[in-house]
Image (tube, rainbow, N blue to C red):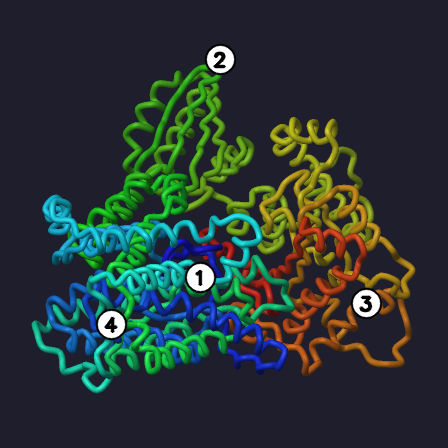
Amino acid sequence: MTATHEGAAENSAGTALSTPPSAPPPVSVKSFPADLSASIAVFLIALPLSLGIALATGAPLQAGLVAAAVGGIVAGRLGGAPLQVSGPAAGLTVVTAELIQRYGWRTTCAITVLAGCCQLGLAFLRTARSALMVSPAIVHGMLAGIGVTIALAQLHIVLGGTPQSSAVANVRGLPGQLADLHPVALGISALTLVVLLGWTRVPGRIGRNLRRIPAALAAVATATAFATLAGLSLPRVDLPSWRSHALPELPEGPVLGLIAAVLTITLVGSVESLLSAVATDKLIASERSTDNRPPRVDLNRELRGQGAANIVSGALGGLPVTGVAVRSVANVKSGATSRNSSMMHGLWVLIAAALLVPVLDLIPLAALAALVMAVGVQMVSITHLRTVTRHREVLVYATTIVAVVLGGVLEGVAVGVAVAVALALHRLARTRITVEELDGVHRVWARGQLTFLAVPRLSRVLNQIPHDRPAVIELDGSFMDHAAYETLHDWQDSHRAHGGSAEITGRSTNRTPETDRGMADRGKGPGTGQRGTHQCCRPWTPWQNHCDHQADVGSGDSADTDDRTIPGASTAGSTAGPRRRGAGRLANGISAFQRDTAPHVRDELARLAREGQRPTQLFLTCADSRLVTSMITASGPGDLFTVRNVGNLVPLPGAESTDDSVAAAIEYAVDVLQVDSITVCGHSGCGAMQALLNSHPGTPMTPLRRWLRHGLPSLERMSSRHHAWARIAGRLPADAVEQLCLTNVVQQLEHLRAHESVARRLAEGTLELHGMYFHVGEAQAYLLSEGEDFFDCRVFDSVGQRA
């Protein structure tokens, strides 16, 4: 993704679990020129922005340069996001300005050091992922509120005046400032904004050449050159001697106030850095192939790097440091390949601070103010507004903005969290219950979550249905608490006792009338799920026959009871018992399908029969009976083109084989069905992988052994020193079998890329490859992370929530 302001990033709770720390890749001679070029591009952006942010906070201008240099060198070396660039960010401008006004600059430096220590503590407690739990609407609202506050303050400097102490005061003082304009400052600011906004819009070859120079640098340089050549008299940058540079002192002030200040810097800086790191990781994944990517972001290591940078920056008299999206995006777009780019950018800032002071002293303050004001305006992102509108969180977004502008960052975040919680509770309690009669059947629709708050309305509607009439209750929600469950099913039992019929359907229950009657006959009491069913049947009711069979076997009942349901089934001959039991279970399953499932899917299957199959995905997995593809992918008829074989293997093209079925399926799915993606799914406890590990040379060749030869490259990959061991959810595999199962998924994806049709579609960008691992014992699915052999549960956890 791209960012339109400093520190803006999309939150993806879904995002991936923190990967284990890994050593940085060795620097190659080939990658050094790319990192050098990228570091210069980032330096040219960072230099004017660092001065502008320092001006906006009221800190010494040198503090911005110190933070930029420390952020590049320290956070760049120690952080967990190799291509993220750190430095002073607009997101902390309001907080830092308030601290400077309240406690003074030297105490603010000490607060920065303490905030860095807190970040280190949080990193060692491995809480980095928790920072991403904040609603995106709150984060975007916080950044937008900060942007409004920055823009209002810098507008006074643009007009030639001095900003007030708060956003409200700035608004009140604006009419007086407009009445007392300073034309020179306003002209320089206008020139800066015109160049800044028009720099990337110049067409043709000239525009392409101009865009090699960052717009921020071009705008400030143009304004500086014009002011200098024209001999204009206006306030300019004044960098004092480094000998008089202010260093931190022991904090002085109310203890609670200092603690709140430290926590505010820690919270805002950590959230902004981690969101920027995730956004940078997404940008890299979307723009680069797997063989041209740095290691994925390690959020806890990134938090450690930010903590160390803040300690050093505060100790040297610099502004607070965070990861910043604009510079990180520029770093990625410029072709950086390693963390050396960020570190070199910090070195260039350090050199500029030492050698370019006479040049920097020529920059008009109005030009820097116009630059920072533009950054503040861009922090109110239209893209974010559309996102929160689509997710119906405009109230949270708007409330957070207003609270940040009126009260401050910490107060605004607290108000935003409170509104978000209230909105979630309102949605949980909001349920629409309607009833109508169609063709003699009373149909009740309950849309939303059924909780105890909805019980009075539910009872009132259900009591309107005559006792002797058929009724269908459709639940369109994902949650039903115990009170609603009792009310619904007590009414169902009473309705049936008076001669009526009642069927409950929808998301909250997959129960059929037959299973309900069976449960009523058994007289089981209510529970948290379906009443009277075997535990393994909730909520997967198509397993009812399987679970009942397991329960019968476990309770000592005769396994031959299934034969009684088959008309004409023979009871003679005990040796035929296992075959008859298998046939009985099969017949029962077919009967259950025709009775319970077929009526619901008949229309959809009829449509598929007319229109033909149009699956979106080729799903290649193992023949193991414990893998139920429709269950673990929540798919239905027509969704998946499934290929199953022993060991989920993909033979290489031209490999010696008497079976081309897998290659034929791949060709048919890719070229004829035009699927969008291919998934290779392995699983825990794979017998094929166990057989590979236990194979010995000289063993007689059998069909199974001939087939498993296609898995030998996976065995070689696992033993190779050139490939890192695959990991799962941040841990090493439990044993060699699990390691081979994970490695096999990665290797078979490589085999897929060797197929001509797959390679062609990948080159066109119309096909995606995914790796998946299903842990049978945990009932947990893991996806292979892009760019490295790491499986995590970043999509959904075992209860269906975002991981």
Q: Amino acid at mark 1?
A: Pro
Say which residue appears at 38% left-offset and 32% top-offset: 488
Q: Amino acid at mark 4?
A: Leu
**At numbered mark 1, what does the secondary structure look like: helix, strand or loop?**
loop
**C-alpha distance separating marks 2 and 3:** 61 Å
Q: Earlier in the sequence, mark 1 or mark 2?
A: 1
Return the mark for residue 710.
3
- Which residue occupies the extreme left position in the image? 254
The crowding category of the residue bearing disc 2, from other C-alpha atoms within 10 Å (few below 14, some 14 to 19, many at least 20), is few
User: In this rendering, which labeled residue sits more in front, label 2 or label 4?
Assistant: 4
User: In this rendering, which labeled residue sits more in front, label 3 or label 4?
Assistant: 4
User: In this rendering, which labeled residue sits more in front, label 1 or label 2?
Assistant: 1
Q: Amino acid at mark 3?
A: His
495 or 236: nearer the viewer: 236
Q: Residue 563 falls in which quadrant of the image?
A: top right
Return the mark for residue 440.
2
Q: Amino acid at mark 2?
A: Gly
CB within 8 Å, label 1 to label 4: no
Can you identify the residue that label 1 sits on? 214
User: In this rendering, which labeled residue sits more in front, label 1 or label 3?
Assistant: 1
CB within 8 Å, label 1 to label 2: no
Rendering coords of residue 235 (x, y %): 20, 64
Taking the image as shown, residue 189 lies to the left or right of residue 215, namely left
Can you identify the residue that label 4 sits on? 61
Rendering coords of residue 538 (x, y %): 51, 47
CB within 8 Å, label 1 to label 3: no
Q: Earlier in the sequence, mark 2 or mark 4?
A: 4
Taking the image as shown, residue 583 lies to the left or right of residue 242, namely right
